[in-house]
Image: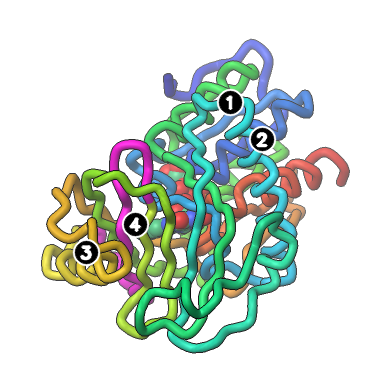
Amino acid sequence: MVARPSAQSTPAEVLVLGGGVAGLTTALCLLRAGKRVRVAARAYLAGTTSAVAAAFWYPYRAYPEAMVAPWARVSYARFAELTRATPEAGVLRRETVEVFPQPASPPAWALDLPDFETLPAAALPPGYGAGYRFTTFVIETTIYLPWLMRQVEAAGGELTTRAYANLDEAVADCPDVVDCTGLGARELVPDPSVYAVRGQVVRVKNPGLSRVWIDEHSGDGITYIVPRSGDVVLGGTADEHEEDTTPDPGRTPAIVERCARLEPALRGAEVVSVVVGLRPVRPTVRLEAEARPGGRIVHNYGHGGAGVTLSWGCAEAAAQLILHT
Ligand SMILES: Cc1cc2nc3c(=O)[nH]c(=O)nc-3n(C[C@H](O)[C@H](O)[C@H](O)COP(=O)(O)OP(=O)(O)OC[C@H]3O[C@@H](n4cnc5c(N)ncnc54)[C@H](O)[C@@H]3O)c2cc1C
Protein backbone atom coordinates (compact mmCIF):
# COMPACT_ATOMS: atom_id res chain seq x y z
CA MET A 1 0.00 0.00 0.00
CA VAL A 2 2.76 2.50 0.92
CA ALA A 3 5.46 3.17 -1.66
CA ARG A 4 8.89 4.73 -1.51
CA PRO A 5 8.97 8.09 -3.33
CA SER A 6 9.03 7.54 -7.05
CA ALA A 7 9.44 9.63 -10.16
CA GLN A 8 5.79 10.44 -10.92
CA SER A 9 4.77 11.03 -14.51
CA THR A 10 2.60 13.92 -13.30
CA PRO A 11 4.13 15.66 -10.28
CA ALA A 12 1.97 16.26 -7.23
CA GLU A 13 0.49 19.73 -6.79
CA VAL A 14 0.42 19.39 -3.01
CA LEU A 15 2.77 17.50 -0.70
CA VAL A 16 1.11 16.48 2.59
CA LEU A 17 3.58 15.67 5.34
CA GLY A 18 2.25 13.15 7.85
CA GLY A 19 0.35 9.89 7.61
CA GLY A 20 -1.70 10.14 10.81
CA VAL A 21 -5.35 11.12 10.97
CA ALA A 22 -4.56 14.81 10.23
CA GLY A 23 -2.43 14.12 7.15
CA LEU A 24 -4.66 11.44 5.63
CA THR A 25 -7.86 13.45 6.13
CA THR A 26 -6.28 16.59 4.70
CA ALA A 27 -4.97 14.65 1.70
CA LEU A 28 -8.45 13.26 1.09
CA CYS A 29 -10.06 16.71 1.22
CA LEU A 30 -7.52 18.06 -1.30
CA LEU A 31 -7.99 15.07 -3.61
CA ARG A 32 -11.77 15.48 -3.49
CA ALA A 33 -11.24 19.13 -4.48
CA GLY A 34 -9.34 17.96 -7.57
CA LYS A 35 -5.70 18.38 -6.47
CA ARG A 36 -2.94 15.87 -7.26
CA VAL A 37 -1.58 14.90 -3.84
CA ARG A 38 1.42 13.02 -2.49
CA VAL A 39 1.55 12.08 1.18
CA ALA A 40 5.01 11.63 2.71
CA ALA A 41 5.33 10.24 6.22
CA ARG A 42 8.02 8.79 8.38
CA ALA A 43 5.49 6.14 9.48
CA TYR A 44 1.88 5.09 8.99
CA LEU A 45 -0.63 3.08 11.04
CA ALA A 46 0.99 1.63 14.19
CA GLY A 47 3.85 4.11 13.87
CA THR A 48 1.52 7.07 14.53
CA THR A 49 -0.12 8.56 17.62
CA SER A 50 -3.41 8.32 15.75
CA ALA A 51 -3.30 4.52 15.98
CA VAL A 52 -3.08 4.68 19.80
CA ALA A 53 -5.97 7.13 20.26
CA ALA A 54 -9.04 5.83 22.08
CA ALA A 55 -10.44 7.45 19.65
CA PHE A 56 -13.81 8.97 20.42
CA TRP A 57 -15.23 12.34 19.44
CA TYR A 58 -14.54 14.52 22.48
CA PRO A 59 -12.70 17.86 22.52
CA TYR A 60 -9.91 17.30 25.08
CA ARG A 61 -6.69 19.27 25.54
CA ALA A 62 -6.96 21.25 22.31
CA TYR A 63 -7.15 25.04 22.07
CA PRO A 64 -8.44 27.71 21.55
CA GLU A 65 -11.92 26.60 22.60
CA ALA A 66 -13.56 29.19 20.32
CA MET A 67 -12.00 27.45 17.26
CA VAL A 68 -12.06 23.90 18.59
CA ALA A 69 -15.87 23.91 18.93
CA PRO A 70 -16.59 24.72 15.23
CA TRP A 71 -13.85 22.36 13.95
CA ALA A 72 -15.19 19.58 16.16
CA ARG A 73 -18.73 20.26 14.94
CA VAL A 74 -17.66 19.69 11.32
CA SER A 75 -16.06 16.35 12.26
CA TYR A 76 -19.17 15.37 14.22
CA ALA A 77 -21.25 15.81 11.07
CA ARG A 78 -18.75 13.85 8.93
CA PHE A 79 -18.61 10.96 11.43
CA ALA A 80 -22.42 10.92 11.57
CA GLU A 81 -22.51 10.61 7.77
CA LEU A 82 -19.95 7.78 7.88
CA THR A 83 -22.02 5.77 10.40
CA ARG A 84 -25.04 6.16 8.13
CA ALA A 85 -23.51 5.48 4.73
CA THR A 86 -20.08 3.85 5.14
CA PRO A 87 -20.06 1.10 7.78
CA GLU A 88 -16.73 -0.24 6.46
CA ALA A 89 -14.99 2.94 7.74
CA GLY A 90 -15.18 1.68 11.33
CA VAL A 91 -17.06 4.58 12.94
CA LEU A 92 -19.57 3.65 15.68
CA ARG A 93 -22.36 5.79 17.13
CA ARG A 94 -22.27 5.53 20.93
CA GLU A 95 -24.27 6.87 23.86
CA THR A 96 -21.90 8.74 26.18
CA VAL A 97 -22.13 9.70 29.83
CA GLU A 98 -19.70 12.24 31.30
CA VAL A 99 -19.69 12.59 35.08
CA PHE A 100 -18.29 15.23 37.43
CA PRO A 101 -17.57 15.16 41.17
CA GLN A 102 -19.08 18.68 41.56
CA PRO A 103 -21.85 20.57 39.72
CA ALA A 104 -20.49 21.73 36.34
CA SER A 105 -21.58 23.98 33.46
CA PRO A 106 -21.86 22.43 30.00
CA PRO A 107 -18.83 23.15 27.76
CA ALA A 108 -19.25 25.41 24.71
CA TRP A 109 -18.86 22.50 22.26
CA ALA A 110 -21.76 20.63 23.84
CA LEU A 111 -24.44 23.23 23.37
CA ASP A 112 -25.41 22.40 19.82
CA LEU A 113 -25.07 18.63 19.99
CA PRO A 114 -28.41 17.20 18.87
CA ASP A 115 -29.20 15.22 22.04
CA PHE A 116 -27.04 16.72 24.81
CA GLU A 117 -28.85 16.54 28.15
CA THR A 118 -28.10 17.04 31.83
CA LEU A 119 -28.64 13.90 33.89
CA PRO A 120 -30.96 14.03 36.92
CA ALA A 121 -29.19 13.34 40.24
CA ALA A 122 -30.93 9.98 40.50
CA ALA A 123 -29.26 8.81 37.27
CA LEU A 124 -25.71 9.55 38.48
CA PRO A 125 -23.38 6.85 39.81
CA PRO A 126 -22.75 7.09 43.59
CA GLY A 127 -20.38 9.91 44.62
CA TYR A 128 -20.91 12.12 41.56
CA GLY A 129 -22.42 15.63 41.63
CA ALA A 130 -23.27 16.18 37.95
CA GLY A 131 -23.41 14.42 34.62
CA TYR A 132 -24.37 14.75 30.97
CA ARG A 133 -25.51 12.37 28.32
CA PHE A 134 -24.90 12.84 24.59
CA THR A 135 -24.17 10.86 21.44
CA THR A 136 -20.56 10.57 20.40
CA PHE A 137 -18.69 8.59 17.76
CA VAL A 138 -16.02 5.99 18.38
CA ILE A 139 -13.52 5.73 15.56
CA GLU A 140 -11.96 2.27 15.43
CA THR A 141 -8.48 3.29 14.35
CA THR A 142 -7.46 -0.23 13.34
CA ILE A 143 -10.23 -0.06 10.70
CA TYR A 144 -10.47 3.69 10.07
CA LEU A 145 -6.80 4.53 9.33
CA PRO A 146 -6.45 1.76 6.69
CA TRP A 147 -9.82 2.89 5.28
CA LEU A 148 -8.54 6.48 5.01
CA MET A 149 -5.38 5.22 3.27
CA ARG A 150 -7.49 3.27 0.77
CA GLN A 151 -9.64 6.36 0.15
CA VAL A 152 -6.53 8.46 -0.55
CA GLU A 153 -5.21 5.91 -3.02
CA ALA A 154 -8.60 5.36 -4.66
CA ALA A 155 -8.86 9.13 -5.22
CA GLY A 156 -5.48 9.08 -7.01
CA GLY A 157 -3.24 10.10 -4.11
CA GLU A 158 0.20 8.61 -3.57
CA LEU A 159 1.35 7.38 -0.15
CA THR A 160 5.12 7.42 0.32
CA THR A 161 7.44 6.75 3.23
CA ARG A 162 9.97 9.49 3.82
CA ALA A 163 11.17 11.56 6.76
CA TYR A 164 11.91 15.20 5.97
CA ALA A 165 14.65 16.97 7.91
CA ASN A 166 13.15 20.45 7.50
CA LEU A 167 10.43 22.31 5.62
CA ASP A 168 12.77 23.87 3.04
CA GLU A 169 13.55 20.35 1.85
CA ALA A 170 9.81 19.75 1.46
CA VAL A 171 9.21 23.03 -0.43
CA ALA A 172 12.07 22.15 -2.77
CA ASP A 173 10.11 18.98 -3.67
CA CYS A 174 6.75 20.69 -4.06
CA PRO A 175 5.89 24.38 -3.65
CA ASP A 176 2.58 23.69 -1.84
CA VAL A 177 3.10 21.75 1.38
CA VAL A 178 0.66 20.89 4.17
CA ASP A 179 2.40 20.14 7.44
CA CYS A 180 0.48 17.51 9.44
CA THR A 181 3.42 16.13 11.40
CA GLY A 182 1.95 16.22 14.92
CA LEU A 183 4.68 16.07 17.54
CA GLY A 184 7.22 15.84 14.68
CA ALA A 185 6.57 19.55 13.96
CA ARG A 186 8.65 20.38 17.02
CA GLU A 187 11.84 19.45 15.14
CA LEU A 188 10.65 19.84 11.53
CA VAL A 189 9.35 23.44 11.67
CA PRO A 190 10.99 23.83 14.27
CA ASP A 191 8.27 24.74 16.82
CA PRO A 192 9.35 24.45 20.46
CA SER A 193 5.81 25.21 21.68
CA VAL A 194 4.69 21.67 20.72
CA TYR A 195 5.17 19.16 23.52
CA ALA A 196 4.18 15.64 24.47
CA VAL A 197 1.52 14.59 26.94
CA ARG A 198 1.98 10.87 27.38
CA GLY A 199 -1.11 8.69 27.44
CA GLN A 200 -1.36 5.02 28.38
CA VAL A 201 -4.46 2.99 27.52
CA VAL A 202 -5.45 -0.58 28.33
CA ARG A 203 -7.42 -2.61 25.81
CA VAL A 204 -9.56 -5.37 27.31
CA LYS A 205 -12.01 -7.86 25.80
CA ASN A 206 -15.44 -6.32 25.53
CA PRO A 207 -17.74 -7.95 28.12
CA GLY A 208 -20.78 -6.62 26.22
CA LEU A 209 -20.52 -2.86 26.84
CA SER A 210 -21.61 -0.16 24.41
CA ARG A 211 -21.75 3.07 26.46
CA VAL A 212 -18.80 5.51 26.55
CA TRP A 213 -17.97 6.92 30.02
CA ILE A 214 -15.81 9.96 30.78
CA ASP A 215 -14.65 11.25 34.15
CA GLU A 216 -12.01 13.90 33.62
CA HIS A 217 -12.25 15.61 37.00
CA SER A 218 -12.26 13.16 39.90
CA GLY A 219 -8.70 13.98 40.76
CA ASP A 220 -7.08 10.57 40.38
CA GLY A 221 -6.39 10.73 36.63
CA ILE A 222 -8.54 11.05 33.52
CA THR A 223 -10.85 8.05 33.24
CA TYR A 224 -12.61 6.89 30.08
CA ILE A 225 -14.25 3.74 28.84
CA VAL A 226 -14.53 3.39 25.08
CA PRO A 227 -16.27 0.24 23.84
CA ARG A 228 -15.30 -0.79 20.30
CA SER A 229 -16.63 -3.76 18.33
CA GLY A 230 -14.23 -6.35 19.80
CA ASP A 231 -12.56 -4.67 22.75
CA VAL A 232 -12.87 -1.76 25.15
CA VAL A 233 -10.24 0.98 25.44
CA LEU A 234 -9.70 2.01 29.06
CA GLY A 235 -7.92 5.22 29.88
CA GLY A 236 -5.87 6.70 30.94
CA THR A 237 -3.00 8.90 31.85
CA ALA A 238 -1.90 12.43 30.90
CA ASP A 239 1.76 12.92 31.82
CA GLU A 240 3.07 16.34 30.77
CA HIS A 241 6.41 16.37 28.91
CA GLU A 242 6.91 12.62 29.31
CA GLU A 243 8.06 10.83 26.18
CA ASP A 244 8.71 7.22 27.14
CA THR A 245 6.42 5.15 24.90
CA THR A 246 7.07 1.92 26.82
CA PRO A 247 3.88 0.90 28.69
CA ASP A 248 4.27 1.12 32.48
CA PRO A 249 2.79 -2.12 33.87
CA GLY A 250 2.54 -0.50 37.31
CA ARG A 251 -0.15 1.90 36.09
CA THR A 252 -2.39 -0.62 34.37
CA PRO A 253 -4.25 -1.92 37.49
CA ALA A 254 -5.16 1.64 38.58
CA ILE A 255 -6.57 2.46 35.12
CA VAL A 256 -8.68 -0.72 35.09
CA GLU A 257 -9.86 -0.15 38.68
CA ARG A 258 -10.98 3.46 38.00
CA CYS A 259 -12.95 2.26 34.98
CA ALA A 260 -14.45 -0.68 36.90
CA ARG A 261 -15.86 1.77 39.45
CA LEU A 262 -18.00 3.17 36.61
CA GLU A 263 -18.65 -0.14 34.83
CA PRO A 264 -18.29 -3.05 37.30
CA ALA A 265 -18.42 -5.56 34.39
CA LEU A 266 -14.85 -4.48 33.61
CA ARG A 267 -13.49 -5.93 36.84
CA GLY A 268 -11.42 -8.95 35.84
CA ALA A 269 -11.79 -8.34 32.08
CA GLU A 270 -9.02 -9.96 30.04
CA VAL A 271 -6.30 -7.48 29.03
CA VAL A 272 -5.61 -7.66 25.29
CA SER A 273 -2.85 -5.02 25.08
CA VAL A 274 -1.43 -1.94 26.79
CA VAL A 275 -0.23 0.89 24.55
CA VAL A 276 1.22 4.37 24.95
CA GLY A 277 1.03 7.43 22.70
CA LEU A 278 2.28 10.99 22.90
CA ARG A 279 -0.43 13.66 22.45
CA PRO A 280 0.93 16.53 20.31
CA VAL A 281 -0.12 19.41 22.59
CA ARG A 282 0.37 23.09 21.73
CA PRO A 283 -0.99 26.26 23.38
CA THR A 284 -3.21 26.52 20.27
CA VAL A 285 -3.72 24.28 17.26
CA ARG A 286 -1.61 25.68 14.43
CA LEU A 287 -3.79 26.07 11.34
CA GLU A 288 -2.41 28.80 9.11
CA ALA A 289 -0.47 29.45 5.92
CA GLU A 290 3.16 30.55 5.99
CA ALA A 291 5.10 31.84 2.98
CA ARG A 292 8.56 30.32 2.49
CA PRO A 293 11.11 31.10 -0.25
CA GLY A 294 9.95 29.14 -3.30
CA GLY A 295 6.60 28.09 -1.89
CA ARG A 296 4.24 28.04 1.07
CA ILE A 297 3.35 25.81 3.97
CA VAL A 298 -0.11 25.30 5.41
CA HIS A 299 0.34 24.08 8.99
CA ASN A 300 -2.21 21.71 10.50
CA TYR A 301 -0.76 20.30 13.73
CA GLY A 302 -0.86 20.56 17.52
CA HIS A 303 -4.27 18.93 18.03
CA GLY A 304 -3.41 17.66 21.52
CA GLY A 305 -5.85 15.10 22.87
CA ALA A 306 -8.42 15.74 20.16
CA GLY A 307 -6.77 15.09 16.80
CA VAL A 308 -9.41 12.60 15.72
CA THR A 309 -12.21 14.86 16.99
CA LEU A 310 -10.83 17.81 15.02
CA SER A 311 -9.66 15.85 11.98
CA TRP A 312 -12.36 16.76 9.44
CA GLY A 313 -12.87 20.33 10.62
CA CYS A 314 -9.16 21.12 10.50
CA ALA A 315 -8.55 19.17 7.27
CA GLU A 316 -11.30 21.06 5.44
CA ALA A 317 -9.97 24.38 6.75
CA ALA A 318 -6.38 23.48 5.73
CA ALA A 319 -7.56 22.45 2.26
CA GLN A 320 -9.39 25.77 1.91
CA LEU A 321 -6.13 27.61 2.67
CA ILE A 322 -4.42 25.70 -0.17
CA LEU A 323 -7.30 26.16 -2.58
CA HIS A 324 -8.21 29.80 -1.94
CA THR A 325 -5.10 31.70 -0.79
C1 LIG B 1 -3.67 7.64 24.73
C2 LIG B 1 -4.26 8.60 23.75
C3 LIG B 1 -5.64 8.66 23.61
C4 LIG B 1 -6.20 9.57 22.72
N1 LIG B 1 -7.55 9.57 22.58
C5 LIG B 1 -8.13 10.44 21.71
C6 LIG B 1 -9.53 10.45 21.53
O1 LIG B 1 -10.26 9.68 22.16
N2 LIG B 1 -10.06 11.34 20.65
C7 LIG B 1 -9.29 12.20 19.93
O2 LIG B 1 -9.82 12.99 19.15
N3 LIG B 1 -7.93 12.20 20.07
C8 LIG B 1 -7.35 11.35 20.95
N4 LIG B 1 -5.99 11.35 21.12
C9 LIG B 1 -5.19 12.38 20.42
C10 LIG B 1 -4.90 11.98 19.00
O3 LIG B 1 -4.35 10.68 18.98
C11 LIG B 1 -3.91 12.96 18.36
O4 LIG B 1 -4.32 14.30 18.56
C12 LIG B 1 -3.84 12.70 16.85
O5 LIG B 1 -3.56 11.33 16.62
C13 LIG B 1 -2.81 13.57 16.17
O6 LIG B 1 -2.84 13.21 14.82
P1 LIG B 1 -1.70 13.69 13.83
O7 LIG B 1 -2.04 13.11 12.50
O8 LIG B 1 -1.52 15.15 13.98
O9 LIG B 1 -0.37 13.02 14.43
P2 LIG B 1 0.22 11.55 14.27
O10 LIG B 1 -0.83 10.52 14.29
O11 LIG B 1 1.31 11.40 15.27
O12 LIG B 1 0.86 11.58 12.84
C14 LIG B 1 1.99 12.36 12.56
C15 LIG B 1 2.54 11.91 11.23
O13 LIG B 1 3.62 12.76 10.85
C16 LIG B 1 4.74 11.97 10.47
N5 LIG B 1 5.94 12.76 10.66
C17 LIG B 1 6.38 13.36 11.80
N6 LIG B 1 7.53 14.01 11.56
C18 LIG B 1 7.83 13.82 10.23
C19 LIG B 1 8.87 14.24 9.37
N7 LIG B 1 9.90 14.97 9.82
N8 LIG B 1 8.85 13.85 8.05
C20 LIG B 1 7.82 13.09 7.59
N9 LIG B 1 6.81 12.66 8.37
C21 LIG B 1 6.81 13.03 9.67
C22 LIG B 1 4.61 10.75 11.36
O14 LIG B 1 5.38 9.67 10.87
C23 LIG B 1 3.11 10.49 11.26
O15 LIG B 1 2.81 9.83 10.05
C24 LIG B 1 -5.38 10.45 21.98
C25 LIG B 1 -4.00 10.36 22.11
C26 LIG B 1 -3.44 9.46 22.98
C27 LIG B 1 -1.96 9.39 23.10
Cβ(mark 4) to ligand 1 < 8 Å? Answer: yes
Cβ(mark 2) to ligand 1 < 8 Å? Answer: no
Task: Give the mark nearest the N terminus, 2 or 3.
Answer: 2
Q: Tell me how far mark 1 sits from mark 3, CA to CA.
A: 32 Å
Task: Please state which of the two labelled residues, at mark 4 or mark 3, is closer to the viewer.
Answer: 3
Residue 81 is labelled as: 2
Residue 129 placed where, x, y %? 47, 85
Task: Give the mark nearest the N terminus, 1 or 2.
Answer: 2
Residue 86 is labelled as: 1
Question: Which segment is the magenta one?
Answer: 227-246
Cβ atoms under marks 4 and 3 closer than 8 Å: no
Left or right? Give the position of 317 relative to 325.
left
Helix, strand or loop for disc 2: helix
The count of marks equals 4
Give the main secondary structure, helix, strand or loop, of the magenta stretch.
loop
Q: Give, as a three-letter code, the residue at label 3.
A: Val
Helix, strand or loop for disc 1: loop
Image quarter (top left, top right, bottom left or bottom right) of the N terminus: top left
